[in-house]
Amino acid sequence: MKLKNDPTAEDFAKLAWSIAHPARVQIVRFLIGREACMCGEIVNQLPLAQSTVSQHLKILKESGLIQGEVDGPKVCYCINEDRLQQLKAFVTEL
């Protein structure tokens, strides 16, 4: 029996990969329920170098799970609620 074409599989995999690291899970949990958060605040929450946290933020942003807005020399990050709901729906449909 062949698997049917699943047009959501690629998007689901991209979202799942974006949270496939404990630090990224922690970042997402930290940002949920917050309006916005400066990068420095996120760095202070994790026992990781600023450059490592920035790399994790980049991956989360590329997946669309978080959004970032430039505020002067800093970037403000927040959860993209639509993408978070989409991820939850994908997991529920498993």
Image (cartoon, rainbow, N blue to C red):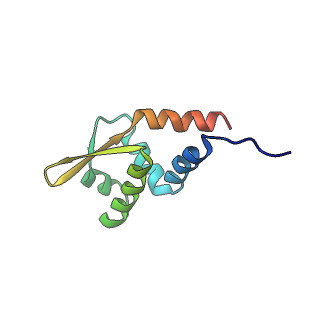
Q: Examine the rendered structure and indicate whether residue 23 appears above or below residue 9.
A: below
Task: Count how many numbered circles sit on residues in the image.
Answer: 0
Provide residue 86's location: percent of width, then percent of height. Answer: 52, 35
Q: Residue at image x 25%, y 54%? A: 40
To which quarter of the image does residue 32 belong?
top left
Q: Residue at image x 53%, y 39%? A: 87
Q: Nearer the viewer, residue 38 or 7?
A: 7
Q: Residue at image x 55%, y 35%? A: 88
The quadrant of the image that shows the C terminus is top right
Left or right: 30 in relation to 93: left
Left or right: 28 in relation to 13: left
- Residue at the far left in the pictured view: 72
Q: Residue at image x 42%, y 56%? A: 59
Provide residue 21's location: percent of width, then percent of height. Answer: 51, 57
Q: Nearer the viewer, residue 9 or 16?
A: 9
To which quarter of the image does residue 6 belong?
top right
The quadrant of the image that shows the N terminus is top right
Q: Examine the rendered structure and indicate whether residue 85 appears above or below residue 59.
A: above
Provide residue 83's location: percent of width, then percent of height. Answer: 46, 37
Left or right: 1 in relation to 39: right
